[in-house]
Amino acid sequence: MKITVTDATFPALAQERAVAEEFGAEFVEAKCASADDVTAAADGTDILIVQFAQVTAQAIAKLAPGSLIVRYGIGLDNIDLAAAQARGVKVAYVPDYATGEVADHTASLILATLRCLLPLDRSVRDGKWDAVGVSGALQSFADTMIGFIGFGRIGQGVLARLKPFGFRSIVADPYADQAVLAELGAEAVDLDTLFARADAITLHCPLTPETRHVVNAERLAARPGRAALVNTARGGLVDPDALAGALESGLLRGAALDVFETEPLPLDSPLRTCPNLILTPHAAWYSISAIERLQGLAADEVRRHLTGAPMRRPAPAG
């Protein structure tokens, strides 16, 4: 029995090692840096635990029969689920370990962006003292509309955190629970309406072929000079070139990103020099307790697999 961790940004892997020892399995910390590294690490592996590395069809073909892939985290777009299903490889993930942390981080970025904290801070450092000139047409929170694209657990958590500030909210999500929307005082709208009305747009939907670049040049031009954008969901939801252009031209008031199409963010990315843009390094999930929950729940999925128990959180079908 072989358990392999492809990549992990955690201080230690004590819980994962403990499960391996419990079942007498070989434990490998592969430290993969590429898809080819993952393919090599997967060869003969019974359980593959992955954080950010790409698990391709080629890697899945190398796994031992009856194997399991466990994803540290919420999304599954770095795993070829179709290939896994075709080969009978089970996939589990941990979508519920950091709901509060991501909602906290998102709400913090929204507040900082809307209050122009980044340009104000930089203006003082540059020797300026011009609150009105730097902030521009700054709206009160009571006059500000927040638009949510996607409204699952994290989106609802963000709205709950923002509600005391007096924001109004609209939601574009065909699967949103109407009773929850009514309870939270949010209005359901379509995507075009959201981009036309929102003063700040926050993304909380999965990355699918339909949602890739849901934020594009056309939609960013819908509210020139008025809107801000925050993305803590998936980098591929935003066209980075369109975003950079909108920030440089002033079409977009400001933005904050925690996720990117390519991670780490390339050194030559135009996003690095954009004005009024807050960048954080895929950090929204992080807290000490979140790491403990994430690793513990991942280790629990391994234990369930080895004891024949059903997975706690299997990958969604289809």
Image (cartoon, helix red, strand yellow):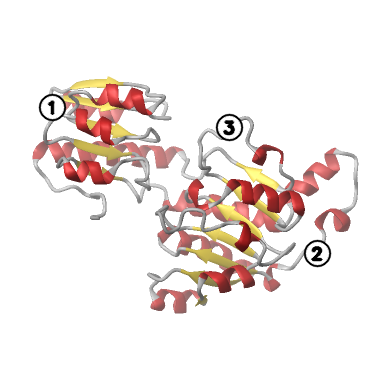
Task: Please tell me which of labels 3 and 2 falls first in the chain.
Answer: 2
Question: Looking at the image, is mark 3 or mark 1 nearer the viewer?
Answer: 3
- Please name the amino acid that badge 2 sits on: Ala
Left or right for 168, reference 125: left
Residue 229 position, x and y percent, is 62, 56
The location of residue 304, given as percent across then percent down, is 16, 41
Query: Mark 1 — residue?
Result: 23
Question: Residue at 25% of width from left, 50% of height from top?
Answer: 313
Crowding near the residue tagged with mark 2, few <14, some 14–19, many ≥20 C-alpha atoms within 10 Å: few
The amino acid sitting under disc 1 is: Phe
- In this rendering, the answer to whether 69 lies above or below 165 is above
Is 124 left, or right, of 221 in this rendering?
A: right
Mark 3 and mark 2: Cα distance apart in space: 33 Å
Of the numbered discs 1 and 2, the one sitting upstream in the chain is 1
Local packing at callout 1 (Cα closer than 10 Å; few below 14, some 14-19, many 20+) is few
The structure residue drawn at horizontal position 41% and vertical position 41%, both measured from the top left corner, is 289
Q: Is residue 88 above or below residue 27?
A: below
Query: Considering the image in quadrants, where does the C terminus appear?
Result: bottom left
